[in-house]
Amino acid sequence: MKIGLLFGSFNPIHVGHLIIANYMANYTTLDKVWLVVSPQNPLKKYGDLINTYDRLEMAKLATDNSIKLEVSDVELKLPQPSYTIDTLAHLKEKYPQHEFAIIMGSDNLVSLPKWKNYKLILRDYQIFVYPRPGYENTELATHPSVTITMTPMMELSATFIRQSIANKKNVQFFVPDAVLNFIESKNLYR
């Protein structure tokens, strides 16, 4: 089975994430997409990241009724900070029957040369790229391992959702109902 890995903090998971994952699982050569909840991205500041297990639970709630989308907690079990190359090596060893690919935005494709062992990633894994505003033409876009997709572009961010919740704005339809109920029940992002 060919599995696409969509890494993220999912702080919180929102419909933009789900649209990307669903597109990749249904409109590319991928059979499934695993949403990999990352404890901490080494290239990002810690900021207002909530409890990892709350983010994991929200991702599970968001994908509960999906056949092709699953949530993975693999990075929670690995040394931190978690580097994609280490996660890929772990998954390859644990699930030799699967072929893994990476899903990333065109903004991450631009910063890929800053990643640990990025040349190995390009050599050994296919990368499916979804468009991000302002990052249409990237140097690595023509690399043989890179597939640029026509995923619908969404300008929705977890930062916007967190700020909206903090300002008591309505975020219905930006996050799945089950996720919104979870956020409200735990009084998150207030």
Image (cartoon, rainbow, N blue to C red):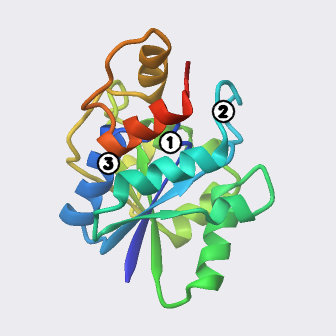
Extreme bottom residue here?
97
Neighbourhood count class around disc 2 (C-alpha, 10 Å): few under 14, some 14–19, many 20 upward: few
Q: Label 2's element?
A: loop
Depth order, front residue of 29/114? 29
| Label 3: which secondary element | helix
How many residues crowd around disc 3 within 10 Å: few (fewer than 14), some, or many (20 or more)? some
- 59 over 47 or under it: above or below: below
Q: Would you say residue 138 is visible in this rendering? A: no
Question: For the residues marked 2 and 3, what is the alpha-carbon distance in whole angstroms?
Answer: 22 Å
Looking at this view, name the residue that lies furthest to the top: 167
The mark lying in front, picked from 1 and 2, is 1
**Figure check: 20 above or below 181:** below
Kindly identify which residue carries mark 2. Answer: 44
In this view, the residue in front, 177 or 103, is 177
2 and 3 marks in contact (CB < 8 Å): no
Q: Residue at x 45, y 35 (%)?
A: 107
Q: Which x, y percent locates residue 73? A: 60, 62
* Sequence-first disc among 1 and 3: 1
- Quadrant of the rendered image containing residue 92: bottom right
The amino acid marked with disc number 1 is Phe
2 to 155, vertically: above or below: below
Left or right, 9 with respect to 26, comes to right
The residue at the point 67 percent across, 37 percent down is 43
* Residue annotated with mark 1: 10
Say whether residue 123 is left or right of residue 15: right
Regarding mark 1 in the picture, which secondary structure is present there?
Answer: loop
Quadrant of the image containing the C terminus: top right
Mark-to-mark CA distance, 1 and 2:
13 Å
Q: Label 2 is placed on what type of residue?
A: Lys
